[in-house]
Amino acid sequence: MSAQGGWRLPWRLLLAAAVLLTAACADGGGEGAPSGPVPEGKPSLRPSPGCSSPDSALYQAAGSSQVRQLTVEGTAREVRVYLPRSLRPEMPAPLVYNFHGLGSSALAQEVYSGLVPLAEREGFVLVSPNGIGSPRGWRVPALVEGQPDPERDLRFFDALHREVAGSLCIDLGRVYATGMSNGAFFSSALACARPQVVAAVAPVAGVFYPPQGCQAPVPMLAFHGTDDRIVPYRQGLIFNVIPYAGAEAYVDAWARLNGCAPSPALERLGSEVVRRAYQGCQAATVLVAVEGGGHTWPGARLEDLIGRATTGQPGSSQTPIPTSLPDLGHTTVQVSAAEMMWAFFRQHARAG
């Protein structure tokens, strides 16, 4: 993975408000000294090859997002890598892959998800790659009928993961994936096709389960708004074109694969958030439904984004900012997808 100078942020489709924080996250988005240990639970501490031969340049620039380039099958791909300041080259760290939505970018997803300050606080590596194509995105096997070379991005992920594991000291038992929309579909595809790599996944506004089924149980925490007009919560069409069974139906399918009892237990987390947790699972399965929520990332506070972009301080804007993005609907702030998914991830590690 070679260093790559410069950066261009496309002003497209998803996450328009997130780009307002570009200046604030140019230095990595860290806030103060690192705090907090590596995750609790049963850490596997399965060191990657990078523990023996780490990329010293990446560790020297810890605390900032670094842009690297990786060429796969003749195509140059850009990747943003964030290492918290607390990491040491001999310390096997958890790893979270973070995939952007269709037409968005690694930088916009890095900002919008709020995972950079969380990585700094909690001590995990965050890798946010750029998709390719026009609009830029990820190919998801079985989602779109007749899609050419549907496993193209799975092969890219394999190459990326080899590069990351060979360059950084990673705990191979604590590798996780999340994403927004098209990136959420891709994180679902990773759980389906690469259960030997990912220990748990947390798709936001785009969970999927293919008709042919998946390889093995993987812990699943999905987030979805009931008023999502792009990826419907219930059975419908994505972009009014692609058939979609609905978030509940796909999480039900994951629950069957994960060995759960059929009826989830419901827990209200706020006036507009319901946690649907399946019981008796071999691998934990949860759907967080945002009542009235749109095609948005729970907990992404637009006033904080604008405040940090303009003055460097959260929430400093003098003008009230609505909790919605144009055409994408309501964003709940009653829960934080970033905080909830990390609490979920830290409970799950792959033993083998």
Image (cartoon, rainbow, N blue to C red):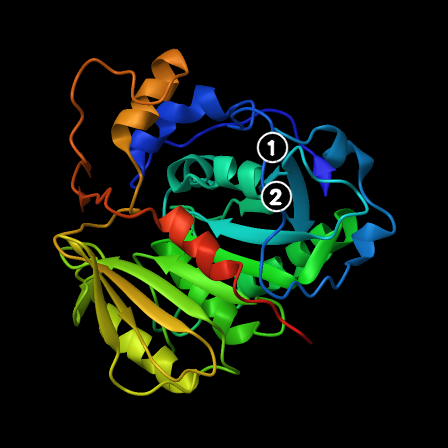
Count neighbours of disc 2 (C-alpha within 10 A) and say few if under 14, some if 14 to 19, many if 20 or more: many
**SS category of the residue bearing label 1:** loop
Circles 1 and 2: CB distance less than 8 Å?
yes
Query: Is 255 situated above or below 25?
Result: below
- Where residue 249 sits in the image (x, y, percent)? 25, 77
Quick one: label 1 or label 2, which is nearer the N terminus?
Answer: 1
Relative to 4, is 284 on the left or the right? left
Residue at (39, 25) in percent of width and height: 21
**Which part of the image, by quadrant, shows the N terminus?**
top right
- Quickly name the residue at label 1: 34
**Hey, what amino acid is under mark 2?**
Gly
**Hey, what amino acid is under mark 1?**
Pro
**Which part of the image, by quadrant, shows the C terminus?**
bottom right
Q: Nearer the viewer, residue 4 or 54?
A: 54
- Quickly name the residue at label 2: 123
**SS category of the residue bearing label 2:** loop
- Where residue 236 sits in the image (x, y, percent)? 16, 69
Quadrant of res 332: top left
Quadrant of res 237: bottom left
Q: Which mark is residue 245?
A: none
Query: Is 332 situated above or below 143?
Result: above
Residue at (39, 84) in percent of width and height: 280
Quadrant of res 20: top left
Whether residue 148 appears in this view of the structure is no
Residue at (52, 82) in percent of width and height: 216
Query: Is 76 situated above or below 286?
Result: above
Q: Nearer the viewer, residue 101 or 146?
A: 101
